[in-house]
Image: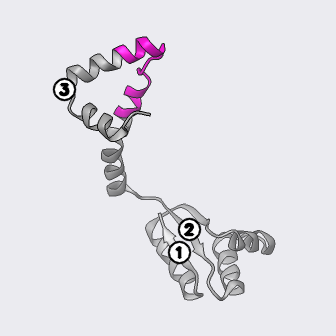
Amino acid sequence: MADLEKLVDELSALTILEAAELKTKLEEKWGVTAAAAAPMMMAAAGAPAAAAEEAEEQTEFNVVLADVGPKKINVIKVVRALTNLGLKEAKDMVEGAPSTVLEAVNKESADDAKTKLEAEGAKVEIK
């Protein structure tokens, strides 16, 4: 087996042109193409910028019940009031934590729901 650390060091020392040539030779040798990796890398490179823009402009939030806490029955009551679910559905949602209680609500509604759930001992995240 090749010494992987040595191989990593050698590959890290390649210039861009040498790396491109290596890519071409490996494609020929193995009969594959690395063309699909380029769009993936470009998308990954653009993702942090898109995430930053989304964070600045976020107008819709999801309220996620991370942990029920000690007052499960009270949390079920709050979930029912917030979502208009039936008793069984609300109970299943609470017992299935982490679960999304509200989706695509405004900041004020998300904060209100978080406050109500946390008052009953639940742990809540707003995403």
Determine the residue positioned at 31% across, 52% down.
52
Visual colour scheme: one colour
**Residue denoted by label 1:** 124
- Which amino acid lies under the numbered mark 2 shown in the image of this protein? Val
- In this rendering, the answer to whether 97 lies above or below 23 is below
Q: At x 23% / y 20%, what residue is drawn?
A: 18
Q: Residue furthest front?
A: 1
Q: Nearer the viewer, residue 41 or 93?
A: 41
Q: Which mark is residue 96?
A: none
Q: Going by the image, does 85 lie left or right of 100?
A: right
Labels 3 and 1 touching (C-beta < 8 A): no
The amino acid at mark 3 is: Thr
Q: Is residue 37 magenta?
A: yes
Residue at 44 percent of width and 68 percent of height: 107
Residue at which label 2 appears: 64
Pointers 1 and 2 in contact (CB under 8 A)? Answer: yes
Question: Is tag 1's residue or tag 2's residue first in the polypeptide sequence?
Answer: 2
Disc 3 marks which residue? 15
Q: Is residue 15 above or below residue 102?
A: above
Kind of element beneath mark 1: strand
Residue at 30 percent across and 46 percent down: it is: 49
Q: Residue furthest right?
A: 88
**Mark 3 vs mark 1: in front:** 3
